[in-house]
Amino acid sequence: MVDDLQQSGKPEDKFDFSGQQHHNAPEKLGPFVHNRRHFMKVVSLAGGSILAAPLIEGHQLLAEPLSEPVVDSLLPASLENVVNVAFSVNGSTKPLVVDSRMTLLDALRERLDLTGSKKGCDHGQCGACTVLVGGRRVLSCLTLVATCEGKSVTTIEGLGNINELHPLQASFLKHDGYQCGYCTPGQICSAVALLEEARRGDVSYVTAELRTPASPLQLSNEEIQERMSGNICRCGAYPNIVDAIREVHTGQAVAQVWQFPDGR
Amino acid sequence: MRPFIYSKSDTALAATQLALANPTAKYLAGGTNLVDLMKEDVERPTQLIDITQLPLTQVSAITTGPNQGGVSIGGLGFNADTANHPLIRQRYPLLTQAILAGASAQIRNMATNGGNLNQRTRCSYFYEVATPCNKREPGTGCSALAGVNRLHALFGWSEQCVAVYPSDMAIALAALDATVIVQNPGGTTRAIPFTDYHRLPGDTPQIDNNLALGELVMAIELPANSFADKFCYIKVRDRSSYAFALVSVAAALDLSPDGTTIRQVRVAMGGVSHKPWRALEAERFLVGKPANDATFAQAADAEMRGARPLAHNQYKVELGRRMIVRALSQALTGA
């Protein structure tokens, strides 16, 4: 997030973020911080602009509340190697002007306010940032947004809504497929693609028969585990995640392994 | 991440010429390794040449040339699509199995075949820019040689570098006698036998492979063979999925019509060298011998005799020996 806004690429600049202005930030921000996300945005913009040509002094920036238009008008001045890119996100086209370094994950979270996709490790090791591009599950943290021209991206926000959950969202709720929930958007996006891969007959490392022509597969728990291994759950909700996926995959109810104290 | 110019090319020729014009440029395909290394400040390209739009994704039967009867896989085909292509599943299931042993579903959806070959070592000293590493900064020394080297090489290492090559796919390609077709900025192509594609570290560990400046992987060709019935790729790792190999073994057998004698055999190992390690000693021993665990064990001994373990990877010698036996045995029985 901060990296992509930086003007200079010197490695030590990674840590220049905590300058004088930054130290003062929380105090000065006090009245204007409506929520954590707004706070993060202000701080990250402060970092970006300090390192960029000082069009606006950090403390001036922090002295007044930011609104979305200000955010957008600030960005081009702090970009290097500008790339114009337009792609569809959850059905609507999003034209963006980005620094060539910006990842799809950062574009979704920082520019399009789609914060469902999570930044876990930012190095392709955890799966929290999993989204669907052209229906395929990919890691948005390792995808440069510049490469997304003309593509169709689906995030967790595009799968369902509070009134009409995606069957996997409902199943994760039923089976308590999470604890902290941070990996859940990635888990669900990954599982959506997994179901399609199984329908298509894609094999995995634990599939016994590789040479037969592809046909829809009924996945065992072992298969689901192997196919979901790119999504790490720090809380260890794995058995419940497998139950949630198996229920939607088979179309057959799977018994909950937990209950509310009143037996519901 | 350092700033870089983002360029796109419509043709392979244009891409190679861009690469030739800027020695600090890199091709960008799936980005699963390169983007990560750029975030870590290990790779510092001044320009990325996005080649993902090039039409090099086909998997097709080869009808002419030295690999006639075989299959060509495009350099920019995705690993997941390659593994699941009917021609690969039917004729080269060993390759399917090896690809699917690597990374995660998400990464296999992004990573390309050419990019897979060109991925760099996961040696932690290579990744950690605060430590000396001859591969990252030639002349600074090898931190792993006297450091924590549990994950490092047994074969072919030098005092300059003990890192191992991380790909699973490439281990199967080495076993299957693949050829890498590359195009240079002059527009001419050449074919590199797979075992000559990657290099041992020697005194130049910063150079992973024998690609010349600007050369681009267009395709990987697999010759026709008779290894589709008896094959096995096994991989031992610190966790059972989504981890790099401690040791992996690709094995394939072609038996005499009565099913007792080994006519042809292929064995290649991953996690043990700076390049895919073709176990030629084991292969030489096995040709003409009966296919059973006793000969497999002798072959494994013959191969592992050449191992030069480091302070923390002695375990890989016995592990490698047993894995060769198991891979051959599973290839034989299909179990």
Image (cartoon, rainbow, N blue to C red):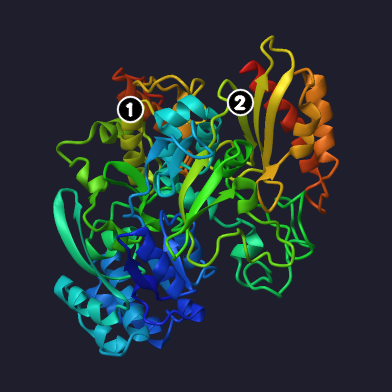
Question: Which residue was labeled with disc 2?
Answer: B231
- SS for callout 2: strand
When the figure is inspected, residue A100 is found, relative to residue A133, above or below; the finding is below
| Residue at 54% across, 30% down | B224
Left or right of A264, for residue B175: right
Q: Give the residue type at disc 1.
A: Arg
| Residue at 53% across, 48% down | B180
Give x and y (percent) for residue B261.
74, 17
Left or right of B189, for residue B239: right
Question: Which residue was labeled with disc 1?
Answer: A200
- SS for callout 1: helix
Circle number at residue B159: none
| Residue at 50% across, 78% down | A11
Asked if residue A14 shows in the view, the reply is yes
Give x and y (percent) for residue B87.
43, 29
Give x and y (percent) for residue A128.
39, 49
